[in-house]
Structure formats: structure tokens, C-alpha cells
Image (cartoon, rainbow, N blue to C red):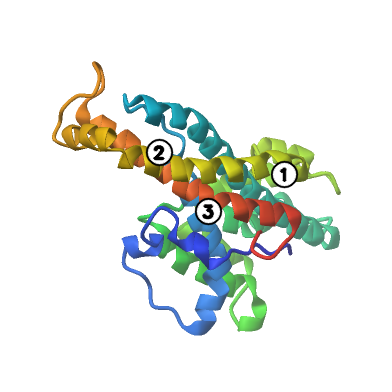
Amino acid sequence: MKKMMMFGALAVLGGALLVGCASTPELSPADEAIVKDWRDNTQLLIETSDPDLSAECKSGIEEVDALANTVTPIARSVSLLIANKLRLTMAENAYADYSAWLGSNPKADAATRLRMAKRYCFEIGLALSSTEETLNDNVLKYLAYDKLQNPENGKSTNEAAWDDFFAKNGSAEVDMWAKALVDNWVAEKPDAFFKAINVKAGDYSKALPKLQKWVTDISTAAARITAITSNSDTAKVLAAASFGKSVVDGISGKETVAAVNRLRKQITITGKLLPWLIDDITGREGGI
């Protein structure tokens, strides 16, 4: 199976560690090793779905808005690229595992095929159904799944055990991916499956020149937003806006401050995501 890896720097994207948003389950070192890659990638999916990364940053401050016209499209594109790449990797894993099983069980009935597809689509389905609030509960579901998935742990892997597991831990995402896998499986041709689950395969290396340019653009933007907001005139405008004074007609002071903060967030998070995405595409340590 193709492994998905993360490096620790991404755990702080956007501020607090996501697992700090709820009661973090206490895991043994062995369980932590099992769940780490799945949880890290799920955190990344949650981060890249943050609406602040694609939201307009219209503040009414001319220099800020001009900068946002460059930054926001980059932030949107990078978050979408990473989300699709994570989903693609998980889809490839599910397709490969199901294909290997089906190759040994070509006469399996429809119910068995769907059950096995759910097994192989559970990781991505659970990841896609996770939110900041549910992530820690889903960590425990993932560990339960892993124990059933690996018979060397001495756990039951019979059909009744899996049916009971999915009845208690399933999700609409797992069901959708599993059905799409069964209905669209073609030997060594995952294209129909990918299309059914809206995952785009392709040569990501073609995006490298653009991504590398964006690294420079975001680095420049980081310096620029600091310079703009440190300017005494702009600082006075933001201070007044923080007390509710409107900068321009149609934009409240509260929204001006929020827009500037969103832009800062887009710059910070995209600046961390871009090197990781480039490393992943080029096969260097740190990517999927």
C-alpha cells in the first residue's frame, strides 16, 4: 500500500493543533504509531477545507486589497491541489487493495464485494467525514478498524464482525466510495472509479514551475503585509476599524479587520503548504 506521510511542521497550520480542540484520547505508543499518518493527513484535509483559505479578503484598504488579489487565488489553488492529492492517494490505495482481493476472489457475491470495498474505503471515508470536533472520536474508530483489518492482532475478521463494525462506525462517505468502487471497478483501470468519486489523477509535476513561482509570491506577500500594516497611516485605519469605524462605504470596521486577518492567515498557511506540496510532487521526504 502506498503510504501517506506528513512532517510535523504542518501540525501547527492555522494556529492550535487540531486535536487540542477536543478531549484528546490517551493512546499507547503502539496505537499512536498506528494512527499517526492517518490522523496527520486527516488534519491536513480539515485545514485545507478551512473557508478562510478561499474567502475574499476585501478590506477597503487599497494596498491590502491589491495584495489579496494575488494571494487569495494562490491560497485557493494550493488548498484544492493538496486536498485532491490526498484524496487521490487514498483512492489509489483503496483501488489497489480491492483489486488484489478481487483477483483472489473473482466469484465473490455482491454483498461480499461491497463489504470488502467498505473495508478498503474506510480510511478515506472516515477522513472525509472528520471535523475539528469529531477528529478525536474518529481516531478511536480508526484504531478499531485497524484491529479488525489486521488478523495478526488476534481479532475476529468474519463477516458478522465487519457488518457490526460498519453499522456502528460507518458513514455516508464510506458508503459512497465503496459503492463507487464496486460499480466502477475495471481491472487495472481506475479512471471510472476516480471519476465517480470526483478525484482527479494527473501529472502534478507539470504544476511545479507555477508552485515554485508561488513560493516567491507568498514570501513577498508575507513581507509586504507586514510593511503595509506597520505603516503608521494604515495602523491608524486598522485601529479605528477595530473600534467599528468604517473604512469605506459598504465595509464595516469589523469586516476590515477580519479581512486583514484572513489575508494574514492565507499567507501564513499557504507559505507552509507550498514547500510540502513541492516536496511531495518531487518525491522528497515530507510529502505523501
Quadrant where the N terminus lies?
bottom right
Q: Is residue 88 visible?
A: yes
User: Which residue lies at the image location 66% right of the left edge and 54% below the top edge?
Assistant: 90
Q: Residue at label 2?
A: 263
Is residue 268 placed above or below 43 in the rendered structure? above
Depth check, front residue: 115 or 221: 221
Depth check, front residue: 40 or 193: 40
> Is 16 displayed left or right of 94 in the figure?
left
**Label 1, label 3: how many angstroms apart (C-alpha)?**
16 Å
Residue 272's mark? 3
User: Which residue lies at the image location 40% right of the left edge and 45% below the top edge?
Assistant: 265
Q: Residue at label 1?
A: 208
Q: Position of residue 152 (x, y in %)?
A: 66, 82
> Is 223 displayed left or right of 86 in the figure?
left
Q: Position of residue 102 (x, y in %)?
A: 80, 57
The kind of residue on which mark 2 rests is Leu
| Residue 233 falls in image quadrant | top left
